[in-house]
Image (spheres, rainbow, N blue to C red):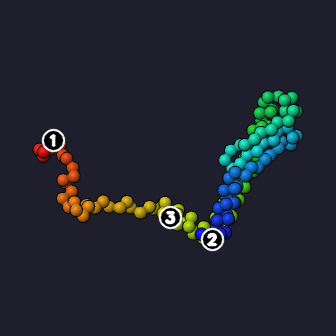
Amino acid sequence: MSDAIHSRLADIQASLTASCSAESADGTVRAEANAKRQIALRLSPAAMKMRPGDLAALILTTQQEAQSKAEAAITETLDTFRADPRVAVALDNLRDTQASPPPPPRRTAEPDDEDDDEDFVIFGHGRD
């Protein structure tokens, strides 16, 4: 693999853990998230003066905005990676293989085990 592909893979890995933040318009709530999960929530003292339902809605909206930014960042990084023609061909080949996998290999008798029955004990058929 070339250094450019390795570099892009490193970018993808960094994007998975990079944090993005969002803040409510009034600055009451600030949330941070990475592509996997929410990682921080900060409330200003003014938040304690809000009605609980309003505060909850503001927290959820702000968290969703931070999460969306983080997901958009990883999507952009992945799209850049997929744009490399070598990667695109490899992904197409992988998708084709998954769509129609090769049949499982046929079991053949071991070369030194040609009769194939001596390895099994059969009960109830008159054989001892």
Could you tell me the amino acid type at mark 2?
Ser
Number of marks in the image? 3
* Residue 112 at x, y percent in the picture: 22, 62
Give the residue drawn at x 79%, y 28%. Answer: 52
* Identity of the residue furthest to the front in this view: 112
Name which quarter of the figure residue 53 lies in.
Answer: top right
Residue 83 falls left or right of residue 92: right
How much space separates mark 2 and mark 3, taking CA atoms? 24 Å
- Name the residue beneath numbered marker 2: 2
* As drawn, 7 above or below 21: below
Name which quarter of the figure residue 107 lies in.
Answer: bottom left
* Residue 70 at x, y percent in the picture: 72, 51
* As drawn, 86 above or below 12: below
- SS of the residue under disc 3: helix
- SS of the residue under disc 2: loop
- Name the residue beneath numbered marker 1: 124
- Name the residue beneath numbered marker 3: 96
Using the rendered image of the protein, determine whether residue 61 is visible from the camera's viewpoint.
no
Could you tell me the amino acid type at mark 1?
Gly
Could you tell me the amino acid type at mark 3?
Asp
The crowd level at tag 2 (other Cα within 10 Å; few <14, some 14-19, many 20+) is few
In front of the other: 120 or 20: 120
In front of the other: 34 or 61: 34
- SS of the residue under disc 1: loop
Whichever of labels 2 and 3 marks the residue nearer the N terminus, that label is 2
